Amino acid sequence: MEAVRALGKALSCGGAGRSPEPRGAAAEERVLVINTGGTIGMVAESGGLAPEPNKLVKALKKMPMLHDKAYAQERVPEFPDDTLVLPLSKQNKRIVYTIKELSPLLDSSNMTPDDWAKIAKHLQKYYEHYDGFVILHGTDTMAYTASALSFMCENLGKTVVLTGSQVPIYELRNDGRANLLGALLFAGQFVIPEVCLYFYHKLYRGNRVTKVDAGSFSAFCSPNLPPLANAEVDITVNWETVWRANTTEKFRVHTNMNTNVALLRIFPGITAAAVKAFLQPPIEGIVLETYGSGNAPNNREDLLEELKKATDQKVVILNCTQCLRGTVTPVYATGQTLTAVGVIPGSDMTPEAALAKLSYVLSKTDISWEEKREKLGENLRGEMTVVPTGAKISLTNSKFIQVLAKFLATSCKEELEAVRDALIPSLACAAANIGDIDALKAIGGQDGNLSCEDYDGRTPLHVASSEGHLPLVEYLLKSGATVYAKDRYGTTPLMNAVKFRHMKVIQLLRDTGAHLSNQDLQNIGTELCRLAANGDVEGLYAWYLAGADMEETGYDGRTPLQVAETKGNSELLNFFDQWKTKKVREDEYARSEYQF
Ligand SMILES: NC(=O)C[C@H](N)C(=O)O
C-alpha cells in the first residue's frame, strides 16, 4: 500500500479541478454570485422574515472568512463596490466574487418560471466573464430551480452552484456563511460543469435533490445519487459521478419553458372526475406521482380510461414514484398497466426534476410529439439512472492495471483505484501527446476521467491542443473534457493552441465556448504589436481566431495596424486589409486566404 501511496503522491492529480497544491503566487478565479433572495439574506420584519435589498454586500464585507479586506484594498480601484475576495484558499487560489442582486429579492415560494429565465439569462450574459457561478436562493423551491436550470443550460461547461441557508447570514448562529463559502470554493476552484446545489458540506447534482427537512441545516438529500463532492476535512470530488455535456457546441440557455405542466399525486380513492378535471386543456403534460415502484390501481377502469384518453389527446404523462428513494420498474402488474395506457416510466427522477424536464422538453418547437416522448425517457442531464447496455470494462478487468497492481503488490479495490488515479493522468497526457485516440479510448474505458490533470495541472486537452491533434481534441471534447481547464500557470487549452498556432484547433475550441481570460489578455496590445513588428502574420491570425481584439493598443499607444503600416510589410498589410474589409465576421474570414 505504501508503494501505491508514494506513486499516487508522485503522480497525483486533482481531477478536473485546478492545480491541487499551493505553489507560488496565488491565481485569481472569478465567480459571479447572483442573489435571488431566500432566508440567507432575510431580516425579521413585522410580517415575518423577508429579504432585505442592498444589505448583503455590506454585511459580507465585515466577515473576514468571506472577505479579505487588506487584499481588496490593495486592488482598489480594480475592485468595485460589489466585488469581494475570499482569503487565500488551501489550494492557493484567490476567489474574487462579484454579487449581482436581482430585483425584487424573493422568498423562493414566490419564484416562477419567469424568474428561472431571468437567472438563466444572467448566466448567458456573464458566462464568458467569470470562471464559475453561485446562485443564492431560498431553500423552499431550490430543488425546482436547480432542476429547471439544469435543463435550461444547454452545453454547460462551467460550474453553477445554487445555495442558501436555513438561518439568515446576519444571525450569530447560521448556516449561511459556511454554505456560501463552500459554494464559492467549488465554483471558483473546480470545473464541475453541472448545475449543482451545495448545502451542509455536500455538493449535489441539482436535478437529483429534494428538500427533506424544514428545521435542519441538513435540509436536502439526493436520494438516488451520491453527492458529487464532500467538503469535510478535505474536499473530495467524485469525478466519476460528474455529468459532462460531451459536446463541441457552445453554451446557450433555453428560457421559454412550457408552463402547461403539473404534478398529480395519486392516493387511495382518487376520483376519475378529479383526474379528468386535471387533464383538461391547456394542460400538455403531467408528472404522475405513483406508489412504490411506479404502481397505480389496475382495478380502476374509470381512472385508466381518463389517463388513456389524455395520452390519446397527446397529453404526456410521466411516471415517478412517491417514494423518496428507488425507481419506477415494470415488476408489478399495477405498474405495467400504466405503461399500457401510454404513461412514460420516469426511472428514479425526483418529481421536481421530472416536472422541469417535462416543461423543457415540451417547449421544444423543433421536435415532434413522438420525439418529445422519446426524449423524456432519455437521460438528458444526469437526472435519471439509465441501466447501461453492454458490459463496461471494469477496473479489475484491465490487464494493464492488473499487471501493475501485481507489481506494486496491491490487492483490494481501493488500492487498485489508487494505482489507476495515479497513472491515468500521465498515461492520458502521453496518449494525447502522440495523438493516439485508441489509447485514450482504452483509458476512458477504465473509468478514467479524461479531464484528469497531471502533476502540472495539465489535461489531455492541453496536450492535444499544444500538439494540434485536431481529431483527438474533438474526441476529448465529445468525451466531456473541459475547455475551461487551467494548468498550474493558469494556461488553458486555447492558449496552448494559440501559442503553437494550430488554427483549426483554436476554431474548434472557440466553437465549444473557449475564450480568452483576463490573464490571457494582459498586455495583449503589446503582444499584437510585437507580432506586427516582426511581420508574424500567422501569430496575429492565431490571436484573432482566439477572439483577441485587433484594435488593442501597445505600450506606446499604437495599434497593431499602425505598427504594420510603419513596417510596410506587404503580407502584413494584406492581412490587415482583409481584416478591415471582410472583418470581424469570422465566417467570411475563415474563407479568406488566412485559413491555415
Ligand atoms: N430557508 C429558506 O430559504 C426558506 C425561504 N422561505 C425561501 O425559500 O426563500
Image: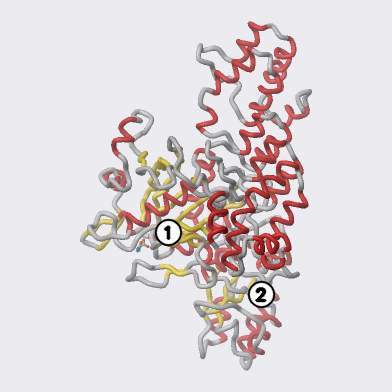
Q: Residue at x 48, y 50 (%)?
A: 118
Residue 378 seen in render: no
Q: Is residue 582 above or below residue 151?
A: above
**For the residues bearing labels 1 and 2, Cβ distance under 8 angstroms:** no
- Tell me residue 156's x, y (percent): 58, 50
Please name the residue that numbered disc 1 is placed on.
231
Picture quarter containing residue 560? top right
- Tell me residue 373's x, y (percent): 69, 68
Mark 2 lies on a secondary structure that is strand
Query: What's the colour scheme?
Result: secondary structure
Mark 1 lies on a secondary structure that is strand
Q: Nearer the viewer, residue 354 or 478?
A: 478
Picture quarter containing residue 570? top right
Mark 1 Cβ inside 8 Å of ligand 1:
no
Q: Residue furthest left?
A: 46
Residue 511, disc: none
Picture quarter containing residue 456? top right
Q: Quadrant of ligand 1?
A: bottom left
Q: Earlier in the sequence, mark 1 or mark 2?
A: 1
Q: Is residue 40 above or below residue 290?
A: above
Please name the residue that numbered disc 2 is placed on.
344
Gap in angstroms between the C-alphas marked 1 and 2: 37 Å
- Tell me residue 383's x, y (percent): 58, 65
- Tell me residue 395's x, y (percent): 67, 65
Amino acid on which the number 1 mark rests in the picture: Ala
Q: Residue furthest bottom?
A: 299
